[in-house]
Image (spheres, grey):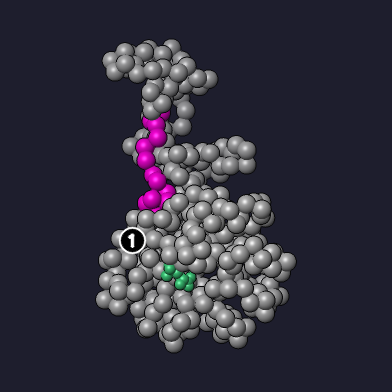
Amino acid sequence: MNEILKELSLIGLIPVTTVEKSDDAVEISRTLAENGISCIEITLRTEAGLDSIKSIAENCPGVVVGAGTVLTVQQVEQVMERGAKFIVSPGLNPDVVSYCIDNDILVIPGVATPSDIEKALSLGIDTVKLFPAEALGGVKYLKAVVAPYQNILKLVPTGGLNTQNYLEYLNIPQVIACGGSWLTPSDAIKEKNYHKMANLANMAIKQILGFKLHHVGLNHASEESAKKASDFFASLFDFAVHDGTGSFMLASQFEFMKSKFAGDNGHIAIGTNSIPRAVYYLNKKGIQIVPDKQIVKNGKLISVYLDMSISGFAVHLVQN
Ligand code: 3PG
């Protein structure tokens, strides 16, 4: 997958933003990035669009800035000169798409029908924006339209998405990110209400990552001592015990290790809705993963250890 597209899919959201002033665009981008969304699509629907892209590219390192509502090849040239990293269009313009492909530029053209999708595929595109997603019929329409192209198409639904419905889209395997203006609403932009945008971004990222305590692992020097402690603990609280290979698991939440495992005292497992997205998010906070301690099952990352410890406990992520 294209590196920029990979980053957009790790963020999972593409705020579509229309501004009247380029200074506002920089402030908005910073607010979003500070709250976990380090990308933005600036539409070319206002005169400030081009300058905004340039200002973000120059002043917001680490933010992936793209151009939206790109209708012509000339606009592609203009936004690329100003530092855009990707192009989004409401529809599928073969000239724009071909130009982008020829120049190795990530383009996400809009599609609404199977014919549009096949046109995109024939031009060499495998990631499209379903637009306007809600008006077309929402999640039900998306599932129906993607069915014949299950393994060859990825989607970025946009148009009518909001706090209430975007997760339903994002849970569909072919959907790599959701786009929309709900994260940077026009009233908040007008009122310079960055607090509101920060809250919206924060809430969305929280929902996407879905961090929660999964289980706690407690180290023991031997199987015998793990058994003694776990039997006692289980009897106190009437927890069910599962005798596993390396541990006794109580109530699926307390793991008594049969030997000293990761961490001085043990480990804390944090559940997340998406390990790759959680790793990307934590990397931005300076936390790396332990490279040789990843567990992959059926091609899917199901556990990673973080290169950190807290109060004598190692920390790992598991799939919710
Ligand atoms: C776009 O350009 O992608 C759409 O206008 C965004 O749609 P929304 O405002 O309904 O989110």
Q: Considering depth in this image, is 291 or 211 the residue closer to the camera? A: 211
The range drawn in magenta is: 205-217
Instruction: State which quadrant residue 46 falls in.
Output: bottom left
Looking at the picture, which amino acid does disc 1 mark?
Leu
Task: Find residue 203 and report its horizontal and vertical position in percent.
Answer: 34, 55
**Residue under the point 27% across and 66% down:** 195
Q: Secondary structure at mark 1?
A: helix
Across and down, in percent, residue 122 comes to 73, 66
Taking the spot 56% from the left edge, 37% from the top edge, the residue there is 295
Direction from residue 281 to residue 9 in the image, left or right:
right
Task: Please indicate, yes or no, whether residue 2 appears anywhere in the rendered image.
Answer: no
Judge: label 1 CB < 8 Å from ligand 1.
Answer: no
Q: Is residue 24 visible?
A: yes
Rendered residue at 62%/52% (across/down): 147
Residue 317, image x, y percentages:
46, 40
Residue farthest right in this picture: 122
Towards the viewer: 33 or 178: 178
- Quadrant holding ligand 1? bottom left
Q: Residue at x 64, y 67 (%)?
A: 116
Q: Which residue is mark 1?
A: 200
Look at the image and tell me in which quarter the C terminus lies: top left
Q: Is residue 157 above or below residue 269?
A: below
